[in-house]
């Protein structure tokens, strides 16, 4: 059923920057009306928060090639349980999404199996090898919303500049991973006293700044639209601020793990805390939060990266990087709300409105005519996370057994309830 009324809800409007008691009427899969105050009939939300569904950027799905880690079906279930209504998927599958045929396979699988909206990125170069540009025009026509080689940093500036120039001619978005590939190669943690005490291979935060400065110089040269997938260090922020002040079409994201965890969380060598880029200092974490608050950082994402048990149950240095995050993105983000660091409209500006706008999705708003992609949640509901109960096939979360607040009560996509009641 796509025609309904949700009332007695605390409406979180990231576009207006407000929260107030009100109601939303859904008709034909779209938001037909939004109003303040009480209204009878329909679904009583019990005073819980109603917000635009989360648009999560950089989600890894293991199809094709690594379906044992995550399928479109399980990713869709995890997203629905986490209030994520749109996932922007990465192209770093075992068979890279670098041709229209592979992209069409992924789109078909997503349409048949996932319960949420799926908007795929495609690779920037063949096999993400950094040598030969993909057919950006054909891939864009086939449905790619952006182009990225992911964490395979394209080290050849001439190849990258050619890709950017061609992408600019097609008004295509390029997503970069700001790291110096040589300095960051093999690193497991951030350099400093803690890394030295633990005896782990480390990388300086300057590697991120160097990678970003290089990319931004090429953006200035080519005029391409550019998004940095993850920033995590304070030393990179001045370059981003200068680029925005100069009028370049640039944006940046940060993962929820880098907003809520720091380098000391790896103290007992738990590989669920091994991420790429590695966890940073507490000073960096606080600077990232402030950058989200003032709009320097545009997007908060989960960088959902499922890994199987075999790749994680290894010595820290040898273990695979990454963590799942579709189901934990919202409760982890609510840590920032409960700490008084970000308001709910500010959180949903970064998790819904901004990513929807940047990646060409019509959602992310509580406004008449917008898709009825919504999440209903209780921000105060406490629970202890049990990774065994996650919907994802892989269970590699750093929040296992953590005390958290914030439960999703309902998720709607196109006006149809896909989680938390009758579907």
Image (cartoon, rainbow, N blue to C red):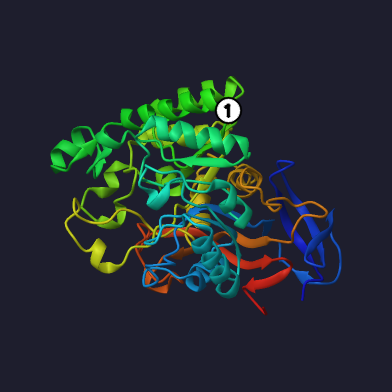
Quadrant position of the C terminus in the picture: bottom right
Work out whether residue 133 or residue 387 is closer to the camera in this orientation and state it: 133
Number of numbered labels in the structure image:
1
Q: Which residue is mark 1?
A: 223
Quadrant position of the N terminus in the picture: bottom right
Work out whether residue 419 or residue 240 is closer to the camera in this orientation and state it: 240
Would residue 128 be visible to someone looking at this image? Answer: yes
Q: Name the image quarter holding residue 263.
A: top left
User: What crowding class fits label 1: few (fewer than 14 Cα within 10 Å), some (14-19), or many (20 or more)?
Assistant: some
- In the displayed structure, 244 sits above or below 263; it is above
- In the displayed structure, 101 sits above or below 18; it is below
Residue for point 37% across, 60% down: 397
Q: Position of residue 29 (x, y in %)?
A: 77, 66
Q: Is residue 286 left or right of residue 299?
A: left
Residue for point 51% across, 32% down: 291
Q: Is residue 153 left or right of residue 376?
A: left
Residue for point 60% across, 46% down: 355
Q: Position of residue 155 (x, y in %)?
A: 34, 35
Work out whether residue 340 or residue 42 is closer to the camera in this orientation and state it: 42
Q: Is residue 374 left or right of residue 56?
A: right
Work out whether residue 162 or residue 418 is closer to the camera in this orientation and state it: 162
Residue for point 32% across, 33% down: 180
Q: Name the image quarter holding residue 133.
A: top left
Q: Name the image quarter holding residue 407.
A: bottom right
Q: Position of residue 403 (x, y in %)?
A: 41, 59
- In the displayed structure, 149 sits above or below 370; it is above
């Amino acid at each position: 059923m796509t025609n309904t009324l949700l009332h007695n809800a605390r409406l979180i409007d990231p576009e207006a920057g407000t929260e107030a008691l009100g109601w939303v009427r859904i008709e034909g899969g779209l938001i037909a009306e939004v109003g303040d105050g009480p209204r009878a009939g329909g679904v009583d939300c019990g005073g819980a928060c109603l917000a635009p569904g989360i648009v999560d950027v950089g989600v890894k799905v293991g199809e094709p090639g690594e379906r044992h880690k995550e399928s479109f079906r399980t990713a869709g279930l995890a997203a629905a349980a986490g209030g994520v209504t749109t996932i922007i998927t990465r192209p770093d599958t075992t068979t890279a999404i670098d041709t229209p045929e592979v992209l069409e396979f992924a789109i078909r699988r997503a349409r048949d199996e996932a319960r949420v909206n799926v908007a795929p990125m495609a690779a920037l170069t063949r096999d993400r090898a950094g040598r030969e540009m993909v057919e950006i025009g054909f891939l864009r026509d086939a449905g790619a919303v952006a182009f990225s080689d992911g964490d395979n940093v394209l080290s050849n500036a001439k190849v990258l500049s050619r890709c950017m120039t061609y992408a600019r001619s097609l008004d295509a978005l390029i997503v970069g991973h700001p790291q110096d590939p040589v300095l960051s190669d093999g690193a497991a943690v951030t350099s400093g006293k803690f890394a030295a005490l633990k005896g782990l291979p480390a990388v300086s935060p300057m590697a991120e700044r160097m990678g970003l400065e290089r990319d931004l110089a090429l953006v200035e040269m080519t005029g391409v639209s550019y998004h940095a997938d993850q920033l995590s260090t304070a030393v990179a922020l001045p370059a981003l601020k200068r680029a925005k002040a100069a009028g370049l079409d640039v944006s940046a994201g940060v993962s929820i793990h880098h907003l809520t965890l720091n380098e000391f969380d790896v103290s007992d060598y738990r590989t669920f805390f091994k991420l790429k880029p590695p966890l940073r200092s507490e000073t960096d974490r606080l600077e990232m939060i402030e950058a989200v608050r003032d709009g320097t950082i545009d997007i908060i994402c989960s960088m959902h990266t499922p890994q199987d048990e075999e790749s994680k149950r290894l010595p820290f240095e040898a273990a695979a990087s990454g963590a799942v995050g579709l189901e934990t993105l919202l409760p982890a983000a609510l840590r920032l709300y409960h700490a008084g660091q970000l308001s709910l409209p500010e959180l949903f500006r970064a998790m819904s409105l901004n990513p929807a706008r940047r990646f060409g999705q019509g959602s992310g708003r509580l406004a008449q005519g917008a898709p009825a992609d919504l999440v209903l949640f209780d921000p105060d509901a406490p629970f202890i996370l049990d990774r065994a109960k996650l919907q994802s096939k892989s269970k590699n979360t750093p929040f296992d057994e953590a005390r958290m607040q914030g439960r999703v009560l309902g998720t709607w996509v196109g006006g149809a309830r896909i989680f938390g009641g009758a579907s």
